[in-house]
Image (cartoon, rainbow, N blue to C red):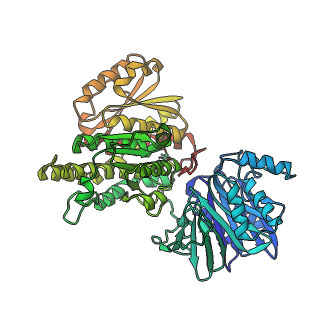
Amino acid sequence: MCGIIGYVGAEPAADVVLDSLRRLEYRGYDSSGIATIDNGNLHVSRAVGKIKMLSAQLAVSPLPGTVGIGHTRWATHGGVTELNAHPHVAGGHVAIVHNGIIENYADIKARLIVAGVVFLSDTDSEVLAHLFHEAFTAGKTPVDALDQVLSEIKGAFALAAIAKQYPDCLMVARNASPLAIGLSDDLVCIASDAVAMAHLTRRVIYLKDGDRAVIRKGEAEIYDIDQQPANREIVTVSAAPMLVDKGGYRHFMEKEIHEQSDAISNTISAMTSETGAITAGFETEHLAAIKHIVILAAGTSFYAGQIGRYWIEQIAGIPVSVEVASEYRYRSPVTASYTTALLISQSGESLDTMKAMEFAKAAGLTTLGIVNVPDSTIARESDIVLPTRAGPEIGVASTKAFTAQLTVLLSLAIALGQQRGRLSIAEADALHAQMMSLPGAIGQAVSRFDEIRPIAHRLSRSHSAFFLGRGTLFPLACEAALKLKELSYVHAEGFAAGEMKHGPIALIEEGVPVICFVGPNELSKKTISNLREAEARGADVIVVCTDSMKDIVDFAEFTVTVPDCTELMAPLVMAIPAQIMAYLTASEKGTDVDQPRNLAKSVTVE
Ligand code: AGP
């Protein structure tokens, strides 16, 4: 996902913007750049690759001025080149940075080319620079220029512009892509994510869709979609997060795998009332209103939702459907019988999930957000937030947020089961006790990296791998496959163990690795016979099971065990070896573990 920074103050803008861009690195990007204005001149520096490349350029050729904008780009339109990096410049007068997609850029570009404009990049964003230049050339003021540009463009955007004609201000606007304004007495700044400027100020205004603003030192003139002056609330964001560091681990992902015991403990605390009951933070009347749920999410969060469906239906008897967020609103879903949309998102900024939330809201559903980033858009716009207390998750591949999401979902299932009288107090207490044992079990599972190294070595030499599971271990198998492919670039697929014989088994031949999660339940016998079918055709069978079951598959090439746990807890505990397997395979292959190629930590385009 792209990141935008802007600054108007007394300090050298390039230094301030560069530091804030570093705080957005976790979002994933492939180029970066900064533009400043000084004495009526525009100065720009851009670089492909990591921010250290831009920093090295600035060390040699610093950018003067106390007004500036910056950008980290995750390529959507146009390849990863310096010409496609932001800021984009028009006529030597205007520089812009943009996050999102200008859907009608081709028509605008064609019009501008006919008018004699020469484009230097392949991006959609460059049209914005020329549109602002066109407006200023026509004598527009910053506010009128914003209105003129915004009246022509369509799509999701967060943008910032600076212009030589108005050297003391930034022009900003947002539609569907987050943008926040940070205010203090001697500066004003803007950022795609408040975390990037929390070290500068914690007083923040979150712009709303359609908002535009002209920002000068110490002030922000904000106008709404109807171009009327808008008074937006100034909120104080959570404590200024430091630049999160690796804490002595090789990668953020390794650190975050090790943080899961704490993440789950903290999340359980957030789900527990002062009396020690699992309430998921709900008042009883809110729980009673939940009668039919649709879960909307993407990627790893989607697989967490699929596991949550098993729990909520089994424990609470409430019907649940789980949908890929990017598909939901386009398939004309029938929403009449649903009461609740449950959005699951680590970042709280995935545009697919945000748009699905908007659709569900418009359909009259109550929206619950299971979100990890407290001040994110989905957190702010959900009717009720169920927080995962995993802390900042920097590695692009989600780990601690996933198990924290599962913790919230299980807590919600228990709270709903109690409220609907399907769980006696004793049964609820027993489930609570199981949950309280989770941090310890997870901690033991995390300590078993070395057991998994031989498997990672094996997988690093594979072209593909298949993951199997039954019950809640089926979505876990899909999540394990996603982890392996997104980190190590080894093709992987997850299947319900019972599905192999309906087609996928045709792919099994000598040496194909089949990793199977065997749960502590009656289904394990069926799963083992599925494994025999694969092994008989040459598969290298790898089993993940509990300590007590370690000899249950005597034909396995490898067996990885986790501490004994109940069937209910199995997907949480077995997620750990799945994460470690993917992490070690990627490490062995030398891929960029924290920022795998082509990926972003939060995808803010559709
Ligand atoms: C997870 O490992 C992936 N990075 C990706 O699938 C992610 O889960 C997905 O993009 C959804 O992100 P969100 O939870 O922030 O909405």
Q: Give the farthest residue toward the bottom.
A: 185
Q: Quadrant of the C terminus?
A: top right
Provide residue 110's location: percent of width, then percent of height: 79, 46
The residue nearer to you, when weighing 355 against 268, is 355
Left or right relative to 357: residue 75: right
Question: Is any part of residue 509 visible from this angle?
Answer: no
Residue at 71 percent across and 45 percent down: it is 78
Provide residue 128's location: percent of width, then percent of height: 73, 57
Provide residue 451's location: percent of width, then percent of height: 38, 40
The residue nearer to you, when weighing 326 against 427, is 326
Position above or below: 323 against 539: below
Provide residue 236's location: percent of width, then percent of height: 47, 74
Position above or below: 223 against 386: below
Q: Toward which corner of the image does residue 596 lie, by quadrant?
A: top right
Q: Toward which corner of the image does residue 32 lie, by quadrant?
A: bottom right
Question: Is any part of residue 90 visible from this angle?
Answer: yes
The residue nearer to you, when weighing 236 against 577, is 236
What number of labels is visible? 0
Residue at 45 percent across and 55 percent down: it is 255
Left or right relative to 488: residue 449: left
Left or right relative to 263: residue 378: right
The residue nearer to you, when weighing 358 against 324, is 358
